[in-house]
Image (spheres, rainbow, N blue to C red):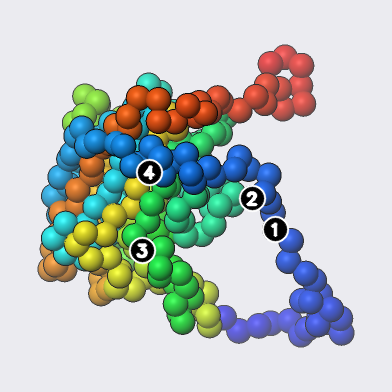
Amino acid sequence: MTKKNPAPPDAADRRAAPPVICYRSDQLPVYKEESFAAARDNFRKIAEVTVPPRDARTFEVKAGQFFRIVSIEGSQVGDLNLWNSNNLSERFYSGKTRQLQASHLTTGDRLWSSLPTMRAMATITHDTLDWYGWDDDGAGVHDVIGTRCDPYTNRQLLDNDYHYCCHSNLTRALADTRGLSLREAEGHIHDVLNVFMCTGFTLDTHQYFMKASPVRPGDFIEFFAEIDLLGALSACPGGNCGSSHSDDETPCFPLLVEVYQPAEGSMPQWSAPIPSAYPGSHGRSEC
């Protein structure tokens, strides 16, 4: 875009204003690595769900259990939605998670729920891709900046209907597991954690980009359920997102979700987070 206005005389001073972190992470509850490590040493797998390529499946995890998303056959990214399994109106809030944690998540980061409950839903306890960090393009793994591929954007940009975008996959999966119509289910689908996806913003045009995921079979990201969770995971039609998405030509692979139960008493100091204590008055007394 062509700049239409000349820089003012004090432009350099304005640009030189120091950045201020909006939400200080040191004000969040401390990540107790030793407690989670002790629980992980003694847990046992109690359930697993295979997510087919270009499709989605749901899974349930009780508060105090762990779950993993595992690469099992090839380089593949996944789109994750989470809800309070007892109340679908409480769901993963990617924007607030991005503000409180980072644009790309890893071990120790929490996934936060929507307003008005706003509490930790899950905590990342292990990430085999934590070695990746930031590459020369400014990309990282497991982002909460992108949304999910969807048929509406596909129609807008390509003028065709593709039914196996992650948005549609997640909609079908939730509808099937909760006995909802597609229209009812679609209202609950929300912005995702892009599991294993490698993304960033271009340095020149600041556009969101994706590149081939570094994930390989055997890699996984692991979460601790802070509350009772219903999850839905889509194996993205973009495969490893190294070329394109929303088509049937890109090589795609299944993903595996595993649920683990820690030994009784292995986390004696943990308790489920309570909803936000804000009373909802919004400055008025009629609440």
Mark 2 lies on residue: 25
Residue 270 vertical placement versus 156 (above, below): above
Disc 4, SS? strand
Mark 4 or 1 closer to N-term? 1
Amino acid type at mark 4: Phe
Q: In the displayed structure, does residue 205 sit left or right of residue 87?
A: right
- Tell me the CA gap for discs 4 and 1: 26 Å
Disc 1, SS? loop
Q: Is residue 148 visible?
A: no
Mark 3 lies on residue: 129
**Image location (x, y in percent) of residue 280:** 66, 24
- Tell me the CA gap for discs 3 and 4: 14 Å
Amino acid type at mark 2: Ser
Mark 3 or 1 closer to N-term? 1
Mark 1 lies on residue: 21
Mark 3 or 4 closer to N-term? 3
- Tell me the CA gap for discs 2 and 3: 22 Å
**Closer to the eye: label 4 or 1:** 4
Asked if the residue under mark 2 is in contact with the one under mark 1, i.e. CB atoms within 8 Å, the reply is yes
Q: In the displayed structure, does residue 110 sit left or right of residue 131?
A: right
Work out which quarter of the rendered image holds the N terminus and state it. Answer: bottom right
Amino acid type at mark 1: Ile
Mark 2 or 3 closer to N-term? 2
